[in-house]
Image (cartoon, grey):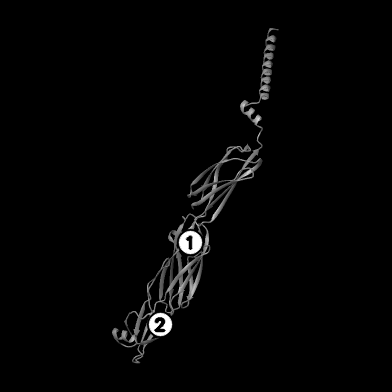
Amino acid sequence: MRKIGTFLISSAVMAGAVLLIPGQGNYSMNAVYATSTDAADTENSQSESSQSETSQTDDNVVVITNTENKSNKKVAYYATPKLVLTGRDIKGDAVKAGEEFEMVLHFKNESNSTKLRNISIKLSSEENQIITTSGSDSIYIENLDKEAECDVTVKMKAKEDLAQKNYSVNVEYNYEDNSKNSFDGTASLTIPVIQEARLGISEVKLSKTELEVEGKTSLSFKINNMGLDTLRNVNVEFSGDTIREITYYAGTIESGASNSVDMTITPDMVGNDDIHIKITFEDATGNVSTYEDLVKLVVNEAKPDDVAEAENEAGVSPALLGGGAIAIIAIIALIAGVVKKIRLKKYE
């Protein structure tokens, strides 16, 4: 037996092509080889192969027999097996930075003639941004039958300080055919990483913690974005039994930034109640979160108009002024009496 050449045969027998799947990597073209039991030149072999019938004798060998002249000349074609990563699923669809997640990889043996064996799969990412948490970054599959599919579940984790964007996980795999010939391939997966939205408030100040009905007090504080995600559609609501409900729209707050809030509160009912502060905001995926806080406020009955005016004009009540004058006179008299006694004792 001698090798007479390598050539492409009809797609009905075997065909190879470069397969490019977006996000899945490149896969090698099927290689096709021919051997003949008789000595003949390439031209005669190609002519005879057009008038032949096919049969399969082994997992990866397709035999073509000439039927025109009954010469029983046989040409065997060996097809390269092909393992393909067809996709992936992530539980929850998105990955939170710093949290563990499960990813399911879908593999398929696209060959209809070759069983794959000793499949080794390795996962990696640039600067270990996303790593496996099972203790090993390699996965082993003993075999995969012709045109069969299999799913592989792997636990992974994204670094806590990753910026919110898409990251790539590289997939490298090696495998063998029945003749222990080795093959390899690569693919790339896209992993969307999001940051947990974190919000807090600080420097909460109430200019007056106690006032009368229809009085005014100023409530101010800062809304702080404490996470690595941008906060969107930040909205603040003020409510309580003693005040009218107020809404304030703060908009977008970038990571590490703050937004100052300064609102005038006008109570319309008497009571010892809390002002409820409710802040709603959205993360990058549109999920809405809520932050709540309380500020104490005492609201008293309004004083009669004549009493209030008198206090405002005098500043201090007449009774208080009269009592103070009497006390001062008593002290002066006491001091004078003591001085007089000292002088009389000196001349005795």
Which residue type carries mark 2?
Answer: Val
Query: Which label sits on residue 131?
Result: 1
Residue 154 point in image, percent of width and height: 51, 66
Say whether disc 1 or disc 2 marks the residue closer to the N-terminus.
2
Residue 299 point in image, percent of width and height: 64, 39
Camera-side residue of 145 and 229: 229
Q: How far apart are the two marked residues, 1 and 2, measured between alpha carbons?
A: 40 Å
Q: Residues within 10 Å of mark 2 (few under 14, many from 20)?
A: some
Query: Which label sits on residue 173?
Result: none
Question: Dot 2 corresponds to which residue?
Answer: 61
Residue 107 point in image, percent of width and height: 47, 71
Which residue type carries mark 1?
Answer: Ile
Q: Are marks 1 and 2 in contact (CB under 8 Å)?
A: no
Question: Mark 1 against mark 2, which lies toward the viewer?
Answer: 2
Quarter of the image for residue 58 reads bottom left
Q: Residues within 10 Å of mark 1 (few under 14, many from 20)?
A: many
Quarter of the rendering occupied by the N terminus? bottom left
Q: Indicate whether 278 appears above or below 92.
A: above
Spot the residue most to the top: 347
Helix, strand or loop at mark 2: strand
Helix, strand or loop at mark 1: strand
Q: Indicate whether 284 appears above or below 271.
A: below
Residue 296 point in image, percent of width and height: 62, 42
